[in-house]
Image: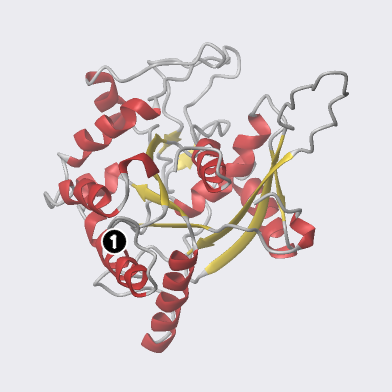
Amino acid sequence: MQSDPASGPPAHDIAMWGAPGSGKTTLLAALNIALMRRKDDWKIIGSDAASSDYLIERTNALSSGKIFPEASQSLEHYRWTLVGPAERQERRWLRRARPAPPLKIGISMVDAPGGLFSAGPVHTGNGSRVVDDLRQRLMDNLVKSRGLVFLFDPIREFELGDAFDHLHPPLTRLAEKMLEIGELRDGMLPHHVAVCITKFDDPRVLETAEKLHLLDSSPDDEYGFPRVSSEDARDLFRALCEVSASGNADMVVNALDQFFHRTRVEFFVTSSIGFYVRPHTKTFDRNDYQNLLPEAGKELRIRGQVHPINVVEPMLWLGRRLAGGGPR
């Protein structure tokens, strides 16, 4: 976890999965933008050419082109290192403290087609043998990983209700493999899980949080964006599950509680594009905040600047947990 990206692969892997269209690829693209907009020294550096190319292409498409990255059609593997400010070291008596090295969090991110484990067809443009190979490669990565990002799209769940269909199969297979190799701890999987509730910028999600009195804002946020704290995010998650089209979303909550230690699961309310900010006011306007609007004869377009919300935080939380900086 603390290794230099040039010295070899990261010590830990973070894998991600979710239903098709839940925003996995967009979340990855928004990560670099979010880091660029932070007021600290955190940055992301590609550990190989493909990872650096991904950062460049996706960042430009989302920020300048105002278009969403294409959904993953194959298993994509990227290696990055999050580099942050050095941790303070206490000065010992009559001894000058040594300069602390910058904090480095290695991330090996595997992104896969959202329908890879669903019962329906997987749109990879390849035959079933290739699909089986992709499933095996992703499962191998889940087994090796100890940090997981699960994306929950509340809008898709309201319209289609298939989040459980995309969580349950890989989770069941993962538990099978971990039991086989003796990695279950007290009957639970050893992974840390960041559950990302996406599309916070959608009025239906924002208004649900508002009705539940879960909205807050940070005094350090120059734009005054509303936020939902991690302490309240689980409550929002449960409320959004209640309007599932299939009525099965409650089993998503139960599956997470059954397979993972509660202290190893954290909820984050995220938005990859954030809210619209008027150029002349530079603040959040409750009467004019939608940053995703339809355009005549075209698909939805991103209206203004991209201001990702809670995109960096899940990665830093996982990285610190894997590095031993949090409760086990």
Q: Is residue 234 above or below residue 143?
A: above
- Secondary structure beneath disc 1? helix
118 and 148: which is toward the camera = 148
287 and 155: which is toward the camera = 155
Side of 29 where 271 appears, left or right: left
Q: Label 1: how many residues lie within 10 Å, few (<14), some (14-19) or many (20+)? A: many
Q: Is residue 282 above or below residue 271?
A: above
Side of 98 where 63 appears, left or right: left
Residue drawn where x is 54% and y is 17% of the image: 223
149 and 318: which is toward the camera = 318
Side of 35 where 276 appears, left or right: left
Would you identify the image quadrant in which residue 52 lies? bottom right
> Mark 1 — residue?
166
Picture coordinates of residue 315, whole percent (x, y): 53, 43
Picture coordinates of residue 74, whole percent (x, y): 49, 71
Would you identify the image quadrant in which residue 139 lies? bottom left
Residue drawn where x is 41% and y is 23% of the image: 227
One can see residue 196 in this view: no
Query: Hey, what amino acid is under mark 1?
Result: His
Residue drawn where x is 39% and y is 65% of the image: 183
> The C terminus appears in which quarter of the rendering?
top left
Picture coordinates of residue 290, whole percent (x, y): 41, 28
One can see residue 26 in this view: yes
315 and 56: which is toward the camera = 315
Side of 232 where 92 appears, left or right: right
